Amino acid sequence: MINMENINITKASGLKVPFNKGKLKQSLLRSGANSEQADEIVSEVMEMLVEGMSTRKIYKTAFRLLRNVSRPMAARYKLKRAIMELGPSGFPFELYVGELLKHKGYKTSVGEIVQGHCVKHEIDVIAEKDNHHFMIECKFHNRQGYLCDVKIPLYIQSRFLDVERQWKQLTGHAEKFHQGWIITNTRFTDDALQYGRCMGLNLAGWDYPKQNGLKDWIDGSGLHPVTCLTTLTQREKQQLLDKKIVLCKTMHHNQSVLQSIGINPPRLQKVMEECSALCEELSAKNFQSAKQHL
């Protein structure tokens, strides 16, 4: 019998690592599968494993098996890839980041052109909360394995300093805390992280900082992108993005959004059921959060 601890799989970067069934099970549990369902899927995946198999093929197999159990679970399982489908331009990702920050209590604006001290700048997201004012650059990538290197925070820091100098001249801004942020759906190189920490930039990647990365923001908010939905085609998802609709929540109890892109019964009902299941999870999270603050 093959010892699965000796089976190496190939990541998107080309790096070969040992297959970790515990990590696969944990991702299935986070998607809402119970322990028995997760164990069954892990067992089926292990039966088809071969040396050097790509993580993409493993994901596709696990996703298909989970979708047979529950489409909403499969929608949550594909979250990372769903974020990568917020393209091909980076603008839907900027809108999505703006929505995540609104959920955190920030006042946001997306795609604004502001005057710096020297030149004008197009800022992906501007966020304000209390006495804090942030200039946010969103770095979107639609393929796995991409890393944001040190050139990105170097460039963003220079832009931020120009904008900050102008902001501080605005009425009421001299005493405000200003900061540049970079938010990406992938990861940063070590040099990029070191430079960001040194210069006081706030860097947020898919899983950085630990327990407060983009993945954690999404898990905490329950705000799923429309690209998560397994009942929509790629073309239909793109039509929604073209209309600047990035959240499943936007379609909850609002069938007209789906009807506007040509989805009619009986498919309409299936899409709404999946969308509602994801949004009911959001409502449950909000209810629990409210209870904790009573």
Image: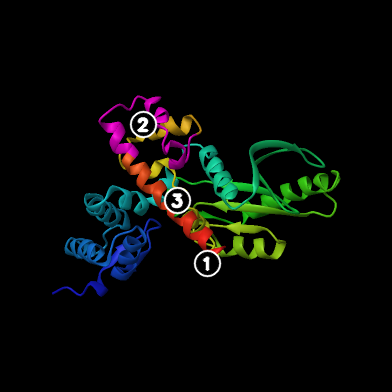
- Looking at the rendered structure, the kind of residue marked 1 is Lys
Q: Is residue 87 above or below residue 153?
A: above
**Which residue is at 33% across, 28% downward?**
263
Specify which label sits upstream in the sequence, 3 or 2. Answer: 2
Q: State the separation of the CA atoms marked 3 and 1.
A: 25 Å
- Looking at the rendered structure, the kind of residue marked 3 is Ser
Q: Is residue 177 left or right of residue 247?
A: right
- Looking at the rendered structure, the kind of residue marked 2 is Arg
Question: Percent from the top left, x then y, of residue 119?
Answer: 78, 38
Secondary structure beneath label 3: helix
Q: Quadrant of the C terminus?
A: bottom right
Q: Callout 2: few (<14), some (14-19), or many (20+) C-alpha neighbours within 10 Å?
A: few
Question: Percent from the top left, x then y, of residue 81?
Answer: 39, 49
Q: Callout 1: few (<14), some (14-19), or many (20+) C-alpha neighbours within 10 Å?
A: few
- Report the magenta residues as a range: 245-272
Q: State the separation of the CA atoms marked 3 and 2.
A: 28 Å
The reply to whether dot 2 and dot 1 touch (C-beta < 8 Å) is no
Q: Which residue is mark 3?
A: 283
Q: Callout 3: few (<14), some (14-19), or many (20+) C-alpha neighbours within 10 Å?
A: some
Circle number at residue 235? 2
**Mark nearer the viewer, 3 or 2:** 3
**Which residue is at 51% across, 33% downward?**
244
Nearer-the-camera pick, 91 or 55: 91
Q: Is residue 4 magenta?
A: no
Q: Quadrant of the N terminus?
A: bottom left
Q: Is residue 260 magenta?
A: yes
Q: Is residue 228 left or right of residue 200?
A: left
